Image: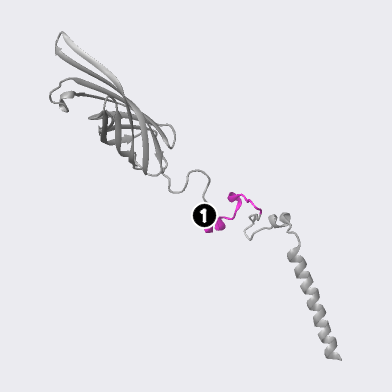
Amino acid sequence: MKLVLLLFFYIKLFCILGCSTLSAITSPIDSTALNSYECSKGTPFHLGINPKFDEIDPDLKSMFPVQRQGRNAGEYEDKHTNLISVELFGRAWLYSINFDHQFSDRLLLGFGASVWDKSFLWKRESSVVTVIPIYVNYYYFLNSNRFFVTGGVDFISSTQTINPNITFEAGGLAAVMGGGYEYRSPKGFVFRSGHYIVIGSSLILIFGANFGLMF
């Protein structure tokens, strides 16, 4: 009889403890009580859905690195917006001295100037050629290594002097489009290479190599 009563007591105790535990698990969490919990160091320990990162204990910050919103990890951040460069061949056919300005992470506007004697390329003709390229670059992959597409126009002027009293002048426009690769070092050195199509009275495919410094 005593054994039966003892067994009944243990069964009843188990039922009471089990119901209490189940009620605690299924009842709504009091977020106010949790947010008021004090850590051992006295710093509020926030367990809300969107806690403020700056209020978390410093030891926990070091355990869980958090990436801030904004530029993606690994992307190169431009510290300079202006570029002075020299391009060999390229848009102006032989060379050009260029100035570029970066308006945004992906958009750059530039212009250049080039003056050379036409006999350098065409031996039978001697005249002074002036080329003013104006262009826009759009960039992909905002790292130190990046690719770009470009489009613009060349203003072209040619002057030929037969004798001190006779001078022939001619001019025109040529559309330029293309793309290529660009490298930017943290200290501002820039190397850019590209292939361009120059569309004027004829179609010219030309390669250009650009070396410059950002400031």
Q: Is 63 placed left or right of 179 in the picture?
A: right
Seen from the viewer's position, the closer of residues 38 and 212 is 212
Q: Which residue is mark 1?
A: 65
Residue 43 rendering spot, x and y as whole percentages: 63, 55
Residue 154 versus residue 190 in the image, above or below: above
* Outermost residue to the front: 202
Residue at x-position 74% and y-position 57%:
30
Question: Residue drawn 40% across and 38% down?
Answer: 139
Seen at 27% across and 18% down, the residue is: 171
Q: Position of residue 201 (x, y in %)?
A: 27, 24
> Over which residues does the magenta segment extend?
48-64
Q: Is residue 46 above or below residue 77?
A: below
Question: Which residue is outermost to the right?
Answer: 1
Q: Residue at x 47, y 46 (%)?
A: 72
Mark 1 lies on a secondary structure that is: loop
Q: Position of residue 87 (x, y in %)?
A: 27, 33
